[in-house]
Image (cartoon, rainbow, N blue to C red):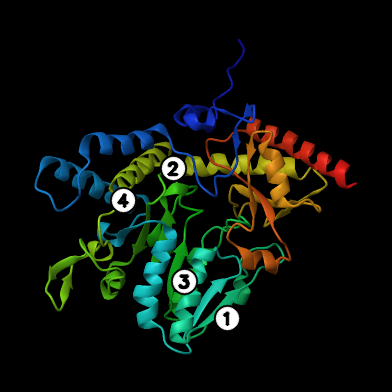
Amino acid sequence: MIALQEKTLADQVRADFPILDQAVNGKPLVYLDNAATSQKPLAVLNALQDYYQQDNANVHRGAHTLSARATDAYEAARDKIAAFVNAASRQEIVYTRNASEAINLVAYAWGMNTLQAGDEIILTVMEHHSNLVPWQLVVQRTGAVLKFVELTETQEFDLGQYKSLISDRTKLVSVVHVSNMLGCINPVVEITAIAHSYGAKVLIDACQSVPHMPVNVQAIDCDWLVASGHKMCAPTGIGFLYGKLDLLRSMPPFLGGGEMIADVFLDHSTYADLPHKFEAGTPAIGEAIALGAAIDYLSNIGMDKIHAYESELTEYLFQQLQQIPEVKIYGPPPSAKGRAALAAFTTGDVHAHDLSTLLDQSGVAIRSGHHCTQPLHRYLNLASTARASLSFYNTRAEIDLFMVALKDAIDFFSNIFG
């Protein structure tokens, strides 16, 4: 008998993502832009539709059945997020529109009210603009100082330099868990422990880690962690902030309005307990419920299983890219230390936007530009890079189609420009 080949994880879940079963410019879609946003499974799309078709009502304020059902589903999703990242309490999970808003919440509610002239904030040169611009605004108002950890020769977080930068003046270390351009997985447990030994707080940007690997906030011991739903199979317009309970309680509200109050008088107000103190106004109810459905979906697969499959796929992607002489990949290669499921690269003098446009004609969707990491690109003396990023529903066959299209594109530009 001929043994049947075991189905890959992508084979098992592919039918859950109908958007992937289409042609683009007459070619099968190969979606390799997952670091920008993930696709959404039917379970998530159905959860969003079910809310609007069956339970559409505002949360917390209504005594009628629809409001009660909406509130239950909305708050159940918060419980799912708390369990997903192993928060100690559901009150440590604050809904936000996205990770950018979550970082701004911390920057304004904690940074503006805590930092003083001469205090230091340590970031890295690989930060996404969302974890850079808010702190630039904070130091402009408070007189605090920004310092930056640079890269090792293998284009990873320079732990040695970090140890030389940190001091008793350091009040915050805010660092990306996984670089969306270099793909390196930063040693956040060690980074946090060192920061805490100096009395500094730690914020982790987990946008590129939470969708791809197990993340445990208690094991990291970070003070805050942020993520965006749209990168983890949920809709746009929803994300979350994790924060340690006592720390969140010590922070004043970020936005004022309905929902975040206890009592309102003409001349003053008192505020609701956590997490509602930071959730002013009508929230993204359907999106939050759908985020809960996305977490159910990912959890049912298993984050360990997702990470293992994506790691295998990443090794295959690197093997194929390294066979093309014109391709230069940035960030560390796959190794025992781990690497994110993406590859940012250049192809000689061909601009990344031109390359991406031509690949689109073959049905291949990749990202081009600076990936919201302009300082990192300047640090590496790059104008732009192309980026192929994977998810658990991608296949080796798609990587093969990408390679054919990439080689054809390189040949095309070579023939034009000689």
Dot placed on the residue nearer the N-terminal end, 4 or 1 = 1
Residue to which mark 2 is pinned: 233
Q: Can you see residue 65?
A: yes
Residue 203: percent from the left, percent from the top?
44, 68
Q: Is residue 210 above or below residue 406?
A: below
Q: Residue at x 40, y 62 (%)?
A: 101
SS at badge 2: loop
Give the CA separation, mark 4 to mark 2. 16 Å
In front: label 4 or label 2? 4
Q: Is residue 53 above or below residue 382?
A: above
Q: Would you say the residues marked 3 and 1 are in contact, meaning their CB atoms lie under 8 Å apart?
A: no
Give the CA separation, mark 4 to mark 3. 23 Å
Q: Amino acid at mark 3?
A: Pro
Q: Amino acid at mark 1?
A: Leu
Give the CA separation, mark 4 to mark 1. 40 Å
Dot placed on the residue nearer the N-terminal end, 4 or 3 = 3
Q: Residue at x 42, y 66 (%)?
A: 103
Dot placed on the residue nearer the N-terminal end, 2 or 1 = 1
In front: label 2 or label 3? 3
SS at badge 1: helix
SS at badge 4: loop
In front: label 4 or label 1? 4
Label 4: how many residues lie within 10 Å, few (<14), some (14-19) or many (20+)? some
Give the CA separation, mark 2 to mark 1. 37 Å
Residue to which mark 1 is pinned: 165
Q: Amino acid at mark 4?
A: Ala
Residue 226: percent from the left, percent from the top?
42, 60
Q: Which mark is residue 134?
A: 3
Q: Residue furthest right?
A: 418
Residue 56: percent from the left, percent from the top?
22, 41
Residue 328: percent from the left, percent from the top?
76, 52
Q: Residue furthest top?
A: 1
